[in-house]
Image (cartoon, helix red, strand yellow):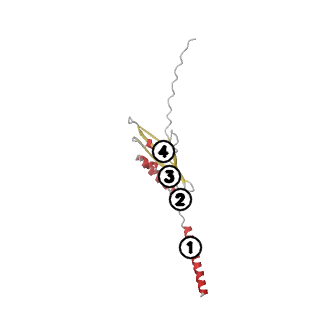
């Protein structure tokens, strides 16, 4: 009877050991899949298309939702926006009646770690002034995206600038010097 109890204890211990090894091995083989660069590129392109649609619809809140809380926005001919209030103010000034903006991604490059990416693209901005005169600008853009701790992708840096030539003011005519009598 003692030999039989010892065998059952050994068999139970061996069985528990085997189960532990199997559970450990199955846990190791079912790691969370790592994002592939191709899937990250698709994600960034999709997010950016949605972002452009939000801006075209003048949806300020939705347009702002694509930025991380610590995003930097570098608009042309203006100071850099380094906080949420400044980013909001810049977008609020752009998404007004009479102004239309849209853009399209032409390239996405994903880091080998698949946690950062940048996008390059083109934009079109149409502004109608108070007199109804329409001005259209077009240019290029660059945005840097970063995967957030919650797994969502957000833009952490955003900049754009015009392809149009810089408007240079006409030089001022120098007033003629007065002749003085000696």
Quarter of the figure with the N terminus: bottom right
Q: CA distance from mark 2 to mark 1?
A: 28 Å
Q: CA distance from mark 1 to mark 4?
A: 54 Å
- The nearer-to-camera label among 2 and 1 is 1
Q: Which mark is residue 118?
A: none
- Toward which corner of the image does residue 114 lie, by quadrant? bottom right
Determine whether label 4 and label 3 are within 8 Å by CB: no
Location of mark 2 (residue)? 36
Location of mark 3 (residue)? 154
Q: Which mark is residue 85?
A: 4
How far across and down, in percent of the image, does residue 15 sit?
Answer: 57, 78
Q: CA distance from mark 4 to mark 3?
A: 17 Å
Mark 4: secondary structure: helix
Location of mark 1 (residue)? 22
Above/below status of 170 relative to 52? above
Q: Earlier in the sequence, mark 4 or mark 2?
A: 2
How far across and down, in percent of the image, does residue 28 sit?
Answer: 56, 67
Mark 3: secondary structure: strand
Q: Earlier in the sequence, mark 2 or mark 1?
A: 1
- The nearer-to-camera label among 4 and 2 is 4
Above/below status of 47 relative to 7? above
Q: Is residue 96 left or right of residue 163?
A: left
């Amino acid at each position: 009877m003692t030999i039989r109890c010892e065998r059952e204890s050994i068999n139970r211990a061996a069985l528990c050991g085997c189960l532990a090894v199997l559970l450990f091995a199955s846990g190791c083989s079912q790691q969370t899949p790592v994002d592939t660069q191709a899937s990250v590129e698709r994600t960034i392109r999709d997010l950016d298309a949605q972002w452009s649609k939000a801006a075209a619809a003048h949806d300020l809140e939705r347009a702002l939702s694509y930025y991380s809380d610590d995003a930097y926005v570098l608009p042309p001919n203006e100071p850099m926006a380094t906080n949420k209030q400044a980013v909001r103010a810049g977008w609020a000034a752009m998404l007004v009646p009479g102004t239309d903006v849209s853009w399209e991604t032409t390239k996405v490059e994903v880091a080998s770690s698949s946690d950062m990416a940048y996008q390059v693209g083109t934009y079109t901005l149409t502004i109608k002034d108070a007199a109804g005169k329409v001005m259209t600008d077009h240019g290029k853009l660059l945005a840097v995206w970063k995967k957030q701790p919650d797994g969502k992708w957000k833009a952490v840096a955003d900049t754009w600038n015009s392809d149009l030539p810089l408007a240079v003011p006409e030089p001022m005519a120098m007033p003629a010097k007065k002749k003085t009598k000696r």
